[in-house]
Amino acid sequence: MFASREDIQAWLVNHKITVDDANSEKPNLEATRTVRGQLIGTFNVSVVNSWDSPDTTPEMIRSISGQLAAAYLYIALYTEDVTDVPAYGQWLYNQAIARLADIKSGVLTVVDDNDVPIDPEGANLFAFFPTDNTPIFSMTDNFA
């Protein structure tokens, strides 16, 4: 999952909803699925798959996923009492989806912990550094 409980709780008032494992697991899973589905066309699958926990997920993606999970949780809790979608839950959802659209259109740039833009192709994920000066291959090698 992309978001931690703290990422979800950041979007909710503490004294009204306390996020725990029991109430956040399904909303967090759905948020992760939504974010993954939205960004797979923008980022290479290997990039998105490298975000395998909140610790390895870029801060912006954690925030969006937390916001989306908070929306799902809020709506689920408050629609038990009313038939309309609660305005705050809808606002959270709309804002998260708009932020995803901004990433896809290039308005927002996802950066790593060092504020370096993440390469959407994942070229910087699998860098190889030899341990000695022996070349791995040369320009004259033939590959079949």
Image: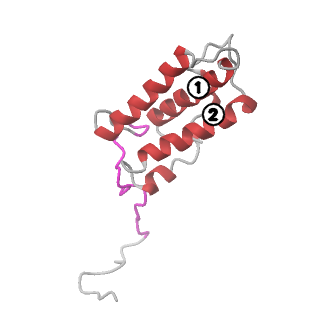
Q: Residue furthest right?
A: 22
Q: Nearer the viewer, residue 1 or 23?
A: 23
Residue 28: quarter of image: top right
Residues at discs 1 and 2 in contact (Cβ within 8 Å): yes
In this rendering, does residue 75 appear at all? yes
In the image, taking residue 58 as reference, residue 117 lies left or right, namely left
Secondary structure beneath label 1: helix
- Residue occupying image coordinates x 45% and y 29%: 96
Q: Nearer the viewer, residue 108 or 100?
A: 100
Is 76 covered by the magenta stretch?
Answer: no
Q: Quadrant of the C terminus?
A: bottom left
Q: Residue furthest front?
A: 83
Give the spatial CA distance, label 1 vs label 2. Answer: 7 Å
- Residue occupying image coordinates x 59% and y 44%: 53
Residue type pointed to by label 1: Ala
The image shows residue 93 at horizontal and vertical percentages of: 49, 26
How many numbered circles are shown? Answer: 2
**Bounds of the magenta span?**
112-131
The image shows residue 77 at horizontal and vertical percentages of: 68, 21
Q: Is residue 110 above or below residue 89?
A: below
- Residue occupying image coordinates x 24% and y 86%: 140
Q: Which residue is mark 2?
A: 27
The image shows residue 6 at horizontal and vertical percentages of: 61, 26
Among numbered discs 1 and 2, the one appearing first in the sequence: 2
Answer few, some or many: residues within 10 Å of disc 2's Cα (few below 14, many 20 plus, some between 14 and 19).
many
Residue type pointed to by label 2: Pro
Q: Quadrant of the N terminus?
A: top right
Q: Which residue is mark 1?
A: 70
The image shows residue 106 at horizontal and vertical percentages of: 28, 38
Residue 33: quarter of image: top right
Secondary structure beneath label 2: helix
Could you tell me what secondary structure mostly forms the magenta stretch?
loop
